[in-house]
């Protein structure tokens, strides 16, 4: 191997190693794959922080002790529940894509969210206080997935299909890989 080839390979390794480090540092690595749809660690962590803030603020408002929330088992349960929700969201979005054009279902979701925000002037402030999120992040993490769920459930209702039954069957038939030593896909849900 010539010096020039060695130098090119060395530079390629350095550049690819730096790229991998940057991706991993920013959470842009898969934590789960659901039927070839990737859920990144960044997405899971964003949902985890929102859920943690919700529970923390709810417990604080009710005067409850935060120690129960901050113990390791509670934190793992929140992570487990968030990953389970993200897997269900991925299944819902995939099914919606089969039934409705992506532009159409995004448009419907945006209209539904606009109706909510028009009728509730305090929603941006509430998102910040309760979830610790700016409104755009609240919309992405909380409102859009719920809007997609409602759109699919509505379409299924019109076709006389049972959404809950479909979701159970979709979970049973899903090909899910979880890249965590603490969590696993078992019996159609995320388990410890």
Image (cartoon, rainbow, N blue to C red):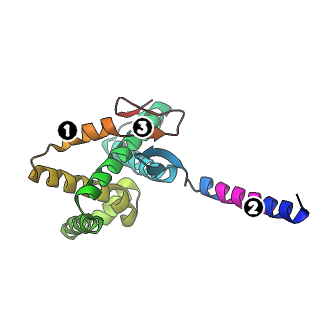
Position of residue 99 measured from the top left corner of the image (x, y, whole percent): 22, 57
Quick one: label 1, few (<14), some, or many (20+) residues within 10 Å? few
Nearer the viewer's eye, disc 1 or disc 3?
Answer: 1
| Residue 52 visible in rendering | yes
| Residue 66 visible in rendering | no
Residue shown at 66% from the left, 60% from the top: 19
Quadrant of residue 68 in the image? top left
Quick one: label 3, few (<14), some, or many (20+) residues within 10 Å? many
Residue shown at 31% from the left, 54% from the top: 93
Task: In this rendered view, identify the residue nearer to me: 141 or 170.
Answer: 170
Which sits earlier in the primary sequence, circle 2 or circle 1? Answer: 2
* Vertical side of 162 occupied by 113: above or below: below
Residue on which the image places disc 3: 80
Furthest residue toward front? 1
Q: Which residues are magenta?
A: 11-21
Residue on which the image places disc 2: 12
Position of residue 15 measured from the top left corner of the image (x, y, whole percent): 72, 62
Q: Quadrant of the C terminus?
A: top left
Which sits earlier in the primary sequence, circle 2 or circle 3? Answer: 2
Residue shown at 9% from the left, 53% from the top: 158
Nearer the viewer's eye, disc 2 or disc 3?
Answer: 2
**Structural distance between the alpha carbons of marks 1 and 3:** 22 Å
């Amino acid at each position: 191997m010539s010096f020039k080839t060695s130098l090119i390979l060395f530079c390629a390794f350095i550049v690819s190693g730096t790229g991998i480090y940057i991706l991993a540092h920013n959470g842009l690595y898969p934590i789960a794959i659901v039927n070839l749809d990737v859920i990144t660690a960044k997405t899971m962590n964003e949902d985890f922080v929102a859920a943690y803030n919700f529970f923390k603020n709810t417990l604080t408002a009710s005067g409850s002790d935060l120690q129960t929330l901050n113990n390791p088992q509670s934190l793992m349960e929140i992570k487990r529940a968030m990953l389970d929700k993200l897997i269900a969201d991925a299944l819902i979005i995939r099914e919606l894509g089969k039934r409705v054009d992506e532009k159409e279902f995004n448009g419907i979701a945006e209209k539904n969210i606009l109706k909510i925000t028009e009728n509730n002037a305090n929603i941006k402030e509430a998102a910040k206080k309760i979830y610790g999120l700016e409104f755009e992040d609240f919309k992405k993490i909380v409102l859009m997935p719920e809007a997609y769920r409602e759109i699919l459930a509505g379409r299924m209702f019109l076709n006389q299909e049972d959404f809950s039954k479909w979701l159970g069957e979709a979970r049973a038939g899903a090909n899910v890989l979880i890249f965590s030593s603490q969590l696993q896909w078992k019996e159609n849900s995320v388990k410890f």
